Image (cartoon, rainbow, N blue to C red):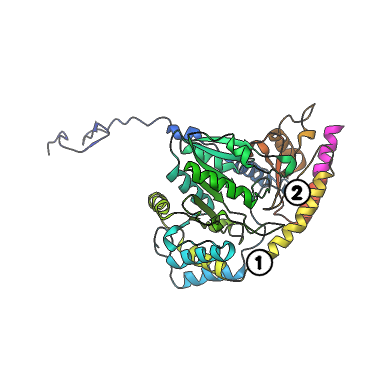
Amino acid sequence: MDADGAGLPHSGGVQYSLMASPVVTRPTGFAQRMARISVSATAAMMIEAEKLRSEGADLIDFGAGEPDFATPEHIKKAAVAALEQNFTRYTPTGGIAALKDAIRQTHAQDFKSTYTRDEVLVTVGGKHALFNAISALIDHGDEVILPAPYWVSFKDMITYAGATPVVVSTDESKGFTLTTEMVSRHLTARTRMILLNSPSNPSGAVFSAQLFRDLLDICRQRGIWLLSDECYSKFIYEGVPYSVASEPESKDWVIIAGSLSKTYAMTGWRLGYALAPKAVVKQMLNLQSHSTSNPTSIVQKAAIAALTGPQEPVGEMLAEYTRRRKVIVEGLRAIPGVSCTMPAGAFYAYPNVSGLLGGKGPKTPMELSEQLLHKAGLVTVPGEAFGTEQHLRFSYATSMKNIENGLRRLAEFAQTLRA
């Protein structure tokens, strides 16, 4: 090697020298795809609420989309046992076989589906399953049918993949229902997927089995995918839970995204899954192998306990949500300027607050949500995050005391707008 540094390795076109530091040009800007996504409105509201809480503010939180119940004991014990047995190493990227079997067998028991082990992918939360599916199947120039109101992350996932979300408004007067005709009007040659979330976050709407069947027929005829998010499938107040995967010969067109987060009060554990054709699972697995790799080992053991163990905690949560639903919806309806459909599932109320907007008061749900936070100590999520412009989302996954006190604060704040 020459004394002047000749022959030393190069980096980014800059030659290193023993005698002088290399001249480095700092990278500027971000990848263009980052401009296609935004910070989740729910996350932003939680950040602001936490800031106020740290300053001593007395807040009542209707924003959190997670159960206020503790994870059932038998699930926690399974995780502890996994630790004690040193089950802490890498597992197969797509999940251990025992968990895949527990997922497909539970789904078969609940919905009469017929998935095999190689049609199951275990993911780091239900959101991960959705992201993997959209990334694997949707490309630039594609269109995805997305009913509104929609969960906040759906739109960003679609745009991140380079596709266009085609928003279809639902019928609020009939409980935010969707019809085949509403969807059909928006189908084009570029339609690649229909994305449904039932029960719905944020509206609590439950789409009928007949709607799913009709849309499945459309998917077969046009060669497009039906992605069904079943995150809240166990929380239905009337009737019985349904999955489109129960329909005969549906698997070639359907991807199911599921989660243990809400059903078993395991939001922080981050465990979800996808059920899909083998070829689709393989592509999603390829993507996962280069991002997260396997879901956490001990959480997989806990998930087996959740799926195969006692199910009474799920029924207890549903019973409590039923009580809370009645109180919060009746309380919202009693406030002048507010109307609210009765949610058929999940644990959210999605009131229309258009009667509180305008005049000298807030002009938009975003402004109303900000004023409720700072003036009334109420944490809500504005409807703009979900694709509507007249609503707020209230999560009733909180105590009855908080619901009652929160409704009182809301009524008092609404009174100031009419003064």
Q: Compared to 404, does 307 lie above or below? A: below
Along the horizontal axis of the image, is 223 left or right of 240? left
Q: Relative to 188, is 61 on the left or the right?
A: right
Tell me the distance, in whole angstroms, between the alpha carbons under discs 2 and 1.
24 Å
Tell me the tag on residue 58.
none
Residue in the foreground of this view, choosing between 386 and 241: 241
* Stretch of the chain drawn in magenta: 409-419
The quarter of the image holding the N terminus is top left
Where residue 364 sits: x, y (%)? Answer: 71, 31
Residue shown at the point (73%, 43%) measured from the top left: 174
Most prominent secondary structure in the magenta stretch?
helix
Q: In screen coordinates, is 26 left or right of 152?
A: left
Q: Secondary structure at mark 2?
A: loop
Residue that lies at the very extreme toward the right in this rendered image: 419
Specify the amino acid type for callout 2: Met
Q: Which numbered tag is attached to residue 313? A: 1
Quadrant containing the C terminus is top right
Residue that label 2 marks: 342
